[in-house]
Amino acid sequence: MNVEHLTELLADSAESRLPPGRMVTSDEGDEDMQPLWLSDGPAAIELWTRMHAEHTRSGLWPLLLDSLDPNDGEFRPWGSGEVFPEQMSSPTSYDSAGLLARWWDTYTAVDEDDDMLDADRRLAVTAPFGQTWPGLAPSRKTTTNPDQLAAEFTQAYLVDRPQARLGLVAAACGAEALTAVGWAGPCNYDNYTAKFSAVVRDWEHRFGARVVAVGFSTLHLSVASPPVAECEALLVAAEHFAFCPDNIWQGSRPYTLAAYAERITGAHHWDFWWD
């Protein structure tokens, strides 16, 4: 994001009375690449709500930002500039369904050298589908307002993580904000954040998802239309496994798709963490 463009958008939002904060320069060293405005102190729910309500007019998407270690003084990756917008491609270059199918094939492949899961246990993790990609879950309609639900989740998130700061990114939606800000959270699995943005954008349309919070390698979405039937939840769980296998591989026991599906049934927030 060009400095002048984001600065202009921030100036246009002066009526929002932004708290003390600063522009973050990318760690790549290009002073003209400042994709993010970051508050100096903890985020306030009132300001997030106001900025979220105004994002269509302002062009700024508000994010709650968490750090790798709240006590390190750098507020990584945001305060330290470990963001890489220069390396990002466009989410429109990728097909969500194709990405999820390819990731599924990769993560369900039997690895004879795996010292954690033998072949039988690896296939049991993704039962009843095994290695067969089951396809996308169907879209769900609801009368719940996705943006109102996002505000409610934001409030709950700040209660749990009061150290989170406010970030403002020039983007039309939360999925695009992930790429615009140069977030590299899933880089140990795939170094192209735009691919993850493409999937999140699809979830925005199919499930009323909204990007609320982002950490060093974490992502938190509110979800207006979560799966409510077992068959739907299993399909969504398969998508989550393809998107972020650590949610199942390193989640709470037992490490199975079925157990994970039960956990997300009716849940209005999805949380992801990449090791």
Image (cartoon, rainbow, N blue to C red):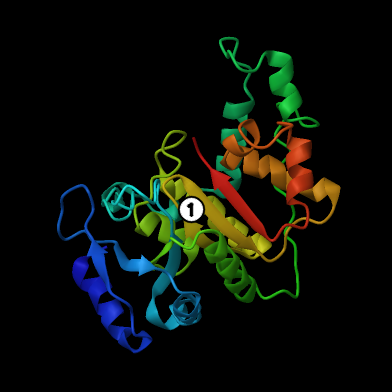
Where is residue 179, by image quadrant?
bottom left
- In this view, the residue in front, 204 or 149, is 149
Q: Is 92 placed left or right of 149 in the picture?
A: left
Type of amino acid at the residue the image marks with label 1: Ser
In the image: residue 210, left or right of residue 58:
right
Residue 170 image-quadrant placement: bottom left
Give 39 or 171, whichever is nearer the viewer.
Answer: 39
Outermost residue to the bottom? 15
Q: Residue at x 30, y 86 (%)?
A: 14
Looking at the picture, does residue 16 appear above or below residue 152?
below
What is the quadrant of residue 19 in the picture? Answer: bottom left
Whether residue 234 is visible, yes or no, is: no
Q: Is residue 48 left or right of residue 147?
A: left
Is disc 1 placed on a helix, strand or loop? Answer: helix
> In this rendering, would 210 be left or right of 56?
right
Q: In x, y percent, where is residue 16? A: 37, 85
Q: Which residue is mark 1?
A: 197
260 w.r.t. 73: above or below: above
